[in-house]
């Protein structure tokens, strides 16, 4: 059994010696993770009369069942979507991204459930991806540029695997097949930031990013949206 197994491998007190303090199950209804933390002591075989003990702590994380969304969090997400995104910035990053992407996708003529893009515009053979930023990253040029680069790289990698005929969804949610010439494809990133984001910093980073891509003969535009309110300021932080 478990207790005998642990004692055989020198875990002190066997099963009773496992301390799970620090573990959490979708903490406060705001997290989408199950985090397991266990601390235990091991007594090493005595060598030269020396009694040695080690304290070991291990941690494992996983998305929870039900797509990793607690019922409480799901209700909050649905409420925020109904309010057109007001309050979205206080959600955990994963859920915030889902809400913003869902709201922005409604504005596209054609959408996609994957393949590295969220929307498609036949005019310009343009693939569109929504990206949102929060925290310290949108306050610094380096963080903004890094986000834009990673978003574009993801699009390029996945879109390059598509054939000349792509499948997208129309406004009714039905699959539609369209021709897309691989040699003339362009890209657009819809970058969504809080309303209080510094426009000078973001515009500088976006300009440098577009210039760098043009030098590599990649046609990409960035549509910056200062939407969905502002994050709640944390006192003292």
Image (tube, rainbow, N blue to C red):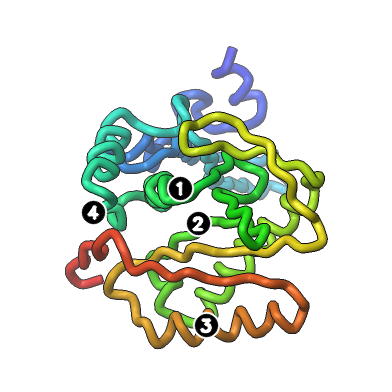
- Disc 3 from disc 2: Cα separation: 17 Å
Sequence-first disc among 3 and 2: 2
Tell me the residue at 54%/45% (across/down): 110
Give the quadrant of the C terminus.
bottom left
Tell me which residue sits at (37%, 82%) in the image.
Answer: 199
Residue at the far front in the pictured view: 123
Q: Residue at x 81, y 44 (%)?
A: 163
Is label 3 in a helix, a strand or a loop? helix
Disc sitting over residue 205 in the figure: 3
Instruction: Compare residues 130 and 56 and report the one nearer the observer.
Output: 130
Name the foreground residue: 77 vs 220.
220
Q: Nearer the viewer, mark 3 or mark 2?
A: 2
Mark 2 neighbour class, 10 Å CA radius: few under 14, some 14 to 19, many 20 or more? many
Q: Which mark is residue 130?
A: 2
How busy is the neighbourhood of tag 4: few (under 14 within 10 Å), some, or many (20 plus)?
some
* Residue 40 appears anywhere in the view: no
Residue 105 is marked as 1
What secondary structure is found at the residue carrying circle 4? loop
Instruction: Answer with mark 4 or mark 3, whichever residue precedes in sequence.
Output: 4
- Looking at this view, is 38 or 205 the one in front? 205
């Amino acid at each position: 059994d478990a207790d005998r197994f642990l004692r055989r491998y020198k875990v002190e007190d066997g099963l009773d010696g496992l301390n799970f303090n620090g573990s959490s199950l979708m903490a406060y209804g705001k997290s989408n993770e199950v985090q397991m933390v266990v601390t235990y002591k091991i007594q090493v075989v005595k060598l030269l009369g020396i009694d040695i003990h080690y304290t070991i702590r291990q941690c494992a994380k996983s998305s929870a069942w039900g797509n990793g969304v607690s019922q409480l969090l799901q209700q909050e997400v649905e409420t925020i979507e109904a309010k057109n995104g007001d309050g979205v910035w206080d959600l955990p990053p994963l859920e915030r991204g889902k809400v913003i992407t869902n709201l922005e996708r409604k504005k596209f003529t054609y959408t996609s459930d994957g393949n590295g893009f969220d929307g498609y515009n036949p005019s310009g053979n343009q693939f569109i991806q929504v990206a949102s930023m929060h925290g310290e990253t949108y306050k610094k040029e380096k963080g903004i540029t890094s986000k834009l680069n990673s978003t574009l790289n993801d699009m390029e990698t996945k879109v390059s695997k598509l054939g000349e005929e792509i499948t997208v969804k129309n406004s009714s949610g039905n699959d539609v097949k369209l021709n897309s010439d691989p040699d003339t494809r362009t890209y657009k990133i819809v970058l969504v930031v809080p309303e209080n984001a510094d426009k000078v910093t973001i515009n500088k980073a976006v300009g440098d990013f577009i210039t760098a891509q043009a030098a590599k003969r990649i046609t990409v535009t960035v549509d910056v949206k200062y939407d969905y309110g502002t994050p709640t300021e944390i006192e003292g932080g």
